[in-house]
Image (cartoon, helix red, strand yellow):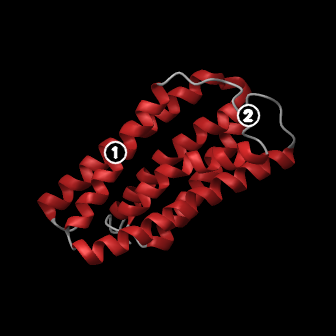
């Protein structure tokens, strides 16, 4: 795997990681026992990897049915997910809707942050990086982002929560557009 390919997957993983970081900051605004932090980290990382894998399966089927066009659809999905992340981060969020640290709140939180991974999974097959490497990078970044968000949550507060998700979306939009342009002009992506 080339350095450029590794850079591509890290860019995508870091975009996802910003969303995970944002939600983790929100959960970490109050003191949490170490065991609950570990549970959140495992749930968020598992959700990110699982949804990316499901998206990759969908992408593989689409690739078989649509051929080369599926890559462009995958890159359009990256842009769409990025736009969604930006829009959602700019909406006013009600605090206290549910507890992100346990029970259904944790499940719903993990699913909500991993929906973008479904779109990422669809396009991940078309950036020229082995799926296993992509999944490992996404897992490492998700676990690191969760840890940092939970640790820094009290200090950073709601401001970092909103801006991290916005920047994650902006990076995904730029990444999707750049990957589509590279594929169009160089056909090696």
Q: Please name the residue shown 33% across and 52% down the image.
A: 77
Mark number, residue 25 = none
Q: Please name the residue shown 82% across and 46% down the image.
A: 36
Q: Between residue 160 and residue 69, name the one nearer to us.
A: 69
Q: Nearer the viewer, mark 1 or mark 2?
A: 1
> Could you say where residue 168 lies in the image, as x and y percent from the top left?
45, 39
Q: Quadrant of residue 187?
A: bottom left
- Quarter of the image for the C terminus: give it: bottom left
**Residue furthest bottom in the image:** 64
Residue assigned mark 2: 28
Q: Quadrant of residue 33?
A: top right
> Could you say where residue 142 lies in the image, as x and y percent from the top left?
59, 52
Residue assigned mark 1: 80
Give me the C-alpha separation between circle 1 and circle 2.
28 Å
Q: Is residue 32 left or right of residue 132?
A: right
- Quarter of the image for the N terminus: give it: bottom left
Secondary structure beneath label 1 = helix
Q: Is residue 68 left or right of residue 132?
A: left
Asked if residue 91 is positioned above or below residue 70 in the image, the reply reads above
Q: Residues within 10 Å of mark 1 (few under 14, many from 20)?
A: some
Q: Between residue 121 and residue 146, name the one nearer to us.
A: 121
């Amino acid at each position: 795997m080339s350095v450029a390919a590794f850079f591509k997957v890290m860019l995508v993983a870091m975009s996802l990681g910003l969303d995970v970081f944002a939600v983790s900051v929100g959960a970490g605004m109050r003191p949490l026992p170490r065991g609950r932090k570990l549970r959140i980290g495992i749930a968020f990382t598992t959700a990110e990897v699982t949804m990316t894998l499901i998206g990759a399966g969908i992408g593989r089927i689409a690739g078989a049915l649509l051929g080369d066009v599926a890559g462009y659809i995958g890159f359009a999905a990256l842009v769409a997910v990025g736009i969604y992340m930006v829009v959602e981060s700019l909406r006013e969020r009600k605090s206290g809707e549910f507890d992100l640290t346990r029970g259904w709140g944790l499940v719903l939180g993990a699913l909500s942050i991993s929906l973008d991974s479904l779109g990422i999974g669809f396009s991940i097959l078309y950036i020229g990086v082995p799926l296993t490497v992509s999944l490992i990078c996404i897992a490492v970044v998700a676990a690191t982002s969760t840890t940092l968000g939970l640790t820094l949550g009290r200090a950073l507060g709601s401001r970092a929560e909103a801006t991290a998700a916005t920047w994650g979306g902006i990076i995904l939009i730029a990444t999707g557009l750049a990957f589509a342009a590279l594929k169009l002009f160089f056909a090696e992506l």
